[in-house]
Image: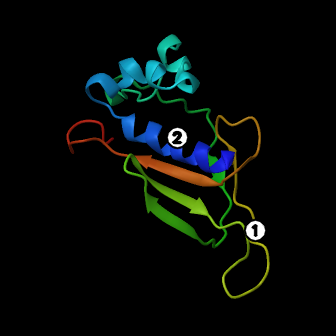
Amino acid sequence: WSSKLAVISAVSWEEWWTYDGISGPAFWGLINPEWSLCNKGRRQSPVNLEPQRLLFDPNLRSVHIDKHRISGTISNTGHSVLFTINNETAPNSGTVQVPVNLTGGPLSYRYRFHEIHIHYGLHDQFGSE
């Protein structure tokens, strides 16, 4: 029963999460106690990337992403497009999928790809970089 309650309350909080008005970034830490860091942090998402101010590092290695065919699920969360890898079995084979790892570039460790969130802005001109 408690897990059902947690899911219901999580859905309710997500309905409040927006970029505008009293449920915008300035209020995220007040809406849900678990988001209190949003009120305290100074470098929170979304990040305004200004291409004209970026510096190129010629010594930075390329990021390497393992090249494996994978299956997954794409869903629209209402806030982002979400792609989650199906970690159970590869399609029609009955075998566990090979993990996709990310290494190199500025990464100090090997990271295993699980899901990606693609966030988009309200308008094409702003926040959809």
Q: Is residue 37 left or right of residue 122?
A: right
**Residue pictured at 66% horizontal, 53% vertical:** 113
Query: What residue is shown at x 66% (from left), y 52% (from top)?
Result: 64
Quick one: which residue is furthest to the right in this view? 95
Closer mark to the observer between disc 2 and disc 1: 2
- Above or below: residue 2 compared with residue 13: below
List x then y, in percent, for residue 93.
Answer: 74, 86
In this rendering, the answer to whether 40 lies above or below 120 is: above
Q: CA distance from mark 2 to mark 1?
A: 35 Å
Find residue 46 and report its image quarter: top left
Q: Earlier in the sequence, mark 2 or mark 1?
A: 2
Residue 14 image position (x, y, % from top left) = 44, 40
- In the image, is 44 to the left or to the right of 59? left
Cβ atoms at labels 2 and 1 below 8 Å apart? no
* Residue 22 point in image, percent of width and height: 30, 23
Q: Residues within 10 Å of mark 2 (few under 14, many from 20)?
A: few
| Amino acid type, mark 1 | Val
Residue hosting label 2: 9
SS of the residue under disc 2:
helix
Graded by Cα atoms within 10 Å as few (under 14), some (14 to 19) or many (20 or more), the crowding at tag 1 reads some
Q: How many marks?
A: 2
Label 1: state its secondary structure.
loop
**Image location (x, y in percent) of residue 4:** 61, 50
Whether residue 37 sits left or right of residue 86 in the image: it is: left
Occupied quadrant, residue 70: bottom right
The type of residue carrying mark 2 is Ser
Q: Quadrant of the C terminus?
A: top left
Q: Quadrant of residue 124?
A: top left
Against 10, residue 116 (above or below) is below
Q: List the single residue furthest toward the front.
A: 1
Determine which residue is flagged by label 1: 98
